[in-house]
Amino acid sequence: MCPTKTRNTKLSSSLGKGGSIIFACEKGFTLLEMMASLSLLMVLCTLVFPQVILLMREEKNTQIRHEAHVLLKEQISSYYMDSAYSQTFTSAVAGTVYEVLWTDVQERNEKRVCMMWNDMNQQRQERCVHVRGKE
């Protein structure tokens, strides 16, 4: 805080090292301080922004996986409840296409049901479950 001897914000100037003038009390930011703070802010933004994008993409992938799990459970429930089921089934939910494929496992009297979809990174994902045959 500036001493109260004078009314203006610049108190006194004296020659500092190297012959430069140093003001004892100034209020406000200099251009150099402003540029330093903005450059620090830009560095922080460049480090944080990609991580935020990755977190948002991973959250969306989690939602897609959850929807695939729900659809897979619905397909298994309809298999046990209904006598008719389709060997292949395609469903589109919120822009994601889910494919269901049923195959027979002969040696165990089971069926294998697989759910396939593309995630936000355009990588093919697959989740398979073995289901006991109806008796």
Image: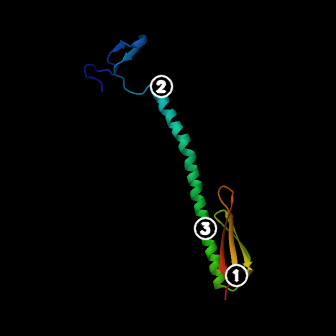
For mark 2, give the secondary structure: helix
Q: Residue at x 69, y 58 (%)?
A: 123
**Left or right of 42 on screen, residue 27:** left
Q: Which residue is mark 1?
A: 108
Within 10 Å of the Cα at label 3, are there few (<14), some (14-19), or many (20+) other Cα atoms?
some
Q: Earlier in the sequence, mark 1 or mark 2?
A: 2
Q: Residue at x 58, y 63 (%)?
A: 63
Q: Which mark is residue 67?
A: 3
Q: Residue furthest left?
A: 5
Q: Which residue is mark 2?
A: 32
Classify 105 as above or below 120.
below
Q: Which amino acid type is marked by label 1?
A: Arg
**Left or right of 103 on screen, residue 60:** left
Image quarter of the C terminus: bottom right
* Spatial separation of the CA atoms under disc 3 and disc 1: 29 Å
For mark 3, give the secondary structure: helix
Image quarter of the N terminus: top left
Q: Nearer the viewer, residue 128 or 23?
A: 128
